[in-house]
Image: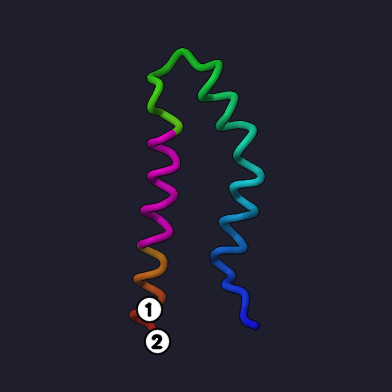
């Protein structure tokens, strides 16, 4: 069974960044949507990497 490396990498990044994002979300004086922008950026980055990878095949 082939484990997708990008999904494994994103899981590791999520595990490392989740506590920091939670602190940013709960205790930040910035806008409430700032963590959502960060997650949206990660999702868009994943989409772009996937599309680039599919074009190589």
Q: Is residue 4 above or below residue 46?
A: below
What residue sits right under mark 1 in the picture? 54
C-alpha separation, residue under disc 1 versus residue under disc 2: 5 Å
Quadrant of the rendered image containing residue 35: top left
Q: Where's residue 30, x and y in %?
A: 42, 17
Q: Which mark is residue 44?
A: none
Magenta stretch contains residue 28: no
Quadrant of the rendered image containing residue 19: top right
Give the residue at x 38% y 19%: 31
Quadrant of the rendered image containing residue 16: top right
Q: Residue furthest front?
A: 1
Q: Where's residue 5, x and y in %?
A: 59, 70
Q: Is residue 34 above or below residue 53?
A: above
Mark 2 burial class by Cα count in 10 Å: few <14, some 14-19, many 20+: few
Q: Where's residue 29, x and y in %?
A: 46, 13
Q: Tags 1 and 2 in contact by the CB under 8 Å rule?
A: yes
Q: Where's residue 27, x and y in %?
A: 55, 16
What residue sits right under mark 2 in the picture? 57
Q: How many marks?
A: 2
Q: Residue furthest top?
A: 29
Q: Is residue 13 left or right of residue 51?
A: right
Q: Secondary structure at mark 1?
A: helix
In magenta, the rendered stretch is 36-47
Main SS, magenta residues: helix
Give the residue at x 38% y 83%: 56
Q: Is residue 25 above or below residue 40?
A: above
Q: Is residue 19 left or right of residue 42?
A: right
Q: Secondary structure at mark 2?
A: loop
Magenta stretch contains residue 41: yes
Give the residue at x 35% y 62%: 48
Looking at the figure, which quarter contains the N terminus? Answer: bottom right
In this rendered view, identify the residue nearer to me: 43 or 1.
Answer: 1
């Amino acid at each position: 069974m082939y484990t997708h490396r990008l999904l494994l990498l994103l899981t590791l990044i999520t595990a490392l960044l989740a506590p920091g994002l939670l602190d940013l979300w709960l205790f930040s004086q910035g806008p409430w949507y700032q963590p959502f922008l960060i997650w949206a950026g990660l999702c868009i980055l994943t989409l772009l990497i996937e599309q680039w990878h599919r074009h190589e095949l």
